[in-house]
Every structure is written in C-alpha cells, then in structure tokens.
Image (cartoon, rainbow, N blue to C red):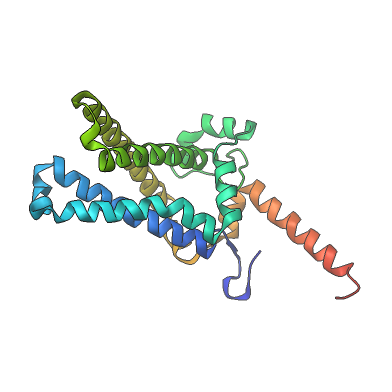
Amino acid sequence: MTDKSHEGQILRYRRAQRVVHAVMASSFLILLITGLALVWSPLAWIAAGGWSGYLHRIAAVGFMSVPFLYLWMDREGAKEVMIESFKYDRDDVSWFKQMYRYALGRTADMPPQGRLNAGQKLHHSAVIVFSAVIVASGLILWWFKSDLSTSMLSWTAIIHDLSMLALTLLLVGHIFFTFVYKAWSSMATGYVSVEDMEMEHAKWVDELDEGLEEELEHSSGDPST
C-alpha cells in the first residue's frame, strides 16, 4: 500500500493514469481556447491567419487519443474507471444527500466511499458522455461539413458547443474541489495521505488492506518463499 519514500501515503494514481490525465487536460484547454477564439471577440486575435484552426485539429487528435492511450498504458485502469464511473450503491445515494457538506470541505461522517466517491463518479461519467458527443460532432464538422444542410450544420455546431460548455463547467467544478481538498500534489506524485483516504474513501482503503492481507497470506503459505 505504501513504500519507504512515501510513508503514511497511498498510491492513488499510477503513472499511466497521470500521463493520460495530463494529455486530456492539455488537449482540452487548447481546444477550449482555440474554439473560443472563433466566437469570442477578445480572443479573435488568436484566430488571425487561421493557424488556430490547425492547432485546434492537432489538439483534437490528442483528445481523441486519450481512451486508446489509456488502454495501451493501463488496460486494467481504463476498465476500472469505466465500470466504477457508472456503478452506484446505497452509500452513493446517501452521499449525494449530503453533498453540500462535501462541497464545503467537510468530509467527517460522510457515507463511506470506494476509490471514487459518488460526486467523482458523476463527474467521470459526465466527462465520458460529453467527450464522446464532442468527438462525434467534431468529426462531422471536420470531415463532412460540406455535405450537411444548413440546418444540420447549425444543429451539429450547437451540440458541439453546448457539449464543450458542459465540459468546461465540469472542469471548473473539478478545479474547485481540487483547491478545496488540496489535491494538486496527488496528480503530480500519485500519492495521497492515508489519513485523508480513510476519511474520504474508507471502503477503498479497506479493499487495499484486504488485498494486502491476502497477498501476505499467500506469500507466507508458499513453500518457495
């Protein structure tokens, strides 16, 4: 669960997960800025000369590569996040009822949570759904724009922009909770405090402890060790 260089901490985000997070975050920010340049006059200078369009497409390729990169670098992790993000239990329902306390930074006595709390599950699932919509509508605008009727082009652009707005709002919420719970370092190092995790993700810590105990029992019962 821990190592000597991270005493009192748990490895929460493996290296592959941190790389995928960095690729997704950086490509999304570039997409957001270059997209805003087309509709928001203060940023219109970015679109001058058309180079922002090329940058937007490059970032789009990076954004679309995220699921494939995740599967390549950490197949089990990708499978895990897909399943966990859409799986809720009674503790999650109870957590939602007290979500206002979590938003205020009060995690004591909150319903026990797994590796992802109910709010993180909702965030992850929303990011997955809206990202899929953005990619689909973006590809249509990229490759089939000339084949669309005026109304279809307008609706595709609206769907694309509204999905981008939804992801932007999710990003704002993500940054807010990152500040509230001082989680910047966890994505940089991958490690988090055992004490914090026991308070915020008690069920996950129990699962790790049970896994460690089983591993130790297996090792002690193996005559080759």
Q: Is residue 61 above or below residue 173?
A: below
Q: Find the residue positioned furthest to the top.
A: 151
Q: In front: 7, or 132?
A: 132
What is the quadrant of the C terminus in the image?
A: bottom right
Q: Find the residue positioned furthest to the front.
A: 147
Q: Is residue 165 above or below residue 42?
A: above
The percent coordinates of residue 63 (x first, y second) are: 36, 51
Q: Residue at x 45, y 41 (%)?
A: 128
Q: Residue at x 53, y 55 (%)?
A: 71
What is the quadrant of the N terminus in the image?
A: bottom right
The total number of labels drawn is 0
The percent coordinates of residue 122 (x first, y second) are: 49, 37
Q: Is residue 74 above or below residue 6?
A: above
The percent coordinates of residue 105 (x first, y second) are: 45, 45
Whether residue 149 sits left or right of residue 187 in the image: it is left
Q: Is residue 221 above or below residue 51?
A: below
Task: Examine the rendering and report whether any part of residue 149 can be seen.
Answer: yes
Q: Residue at x 88, y 69 (%)?
A: 222
Whether residue 13 sits left or right of residue 126 in the image: it is right
Q: In front: 183, or 149?
A: 149
Instruction: Answer with the quarter of the image where residue 116 lies.
Output: top right
Q: In front: 184, or 194?
A: 184
The percent coordinates of residue 121 (x first, y second) are: 52, 40
Instruction: Answer with the quarter of the image where residue 104 lies.
Output: top left
Task: Examine the rendering and report whether any part of residue 108 can be seen.
Answer: no
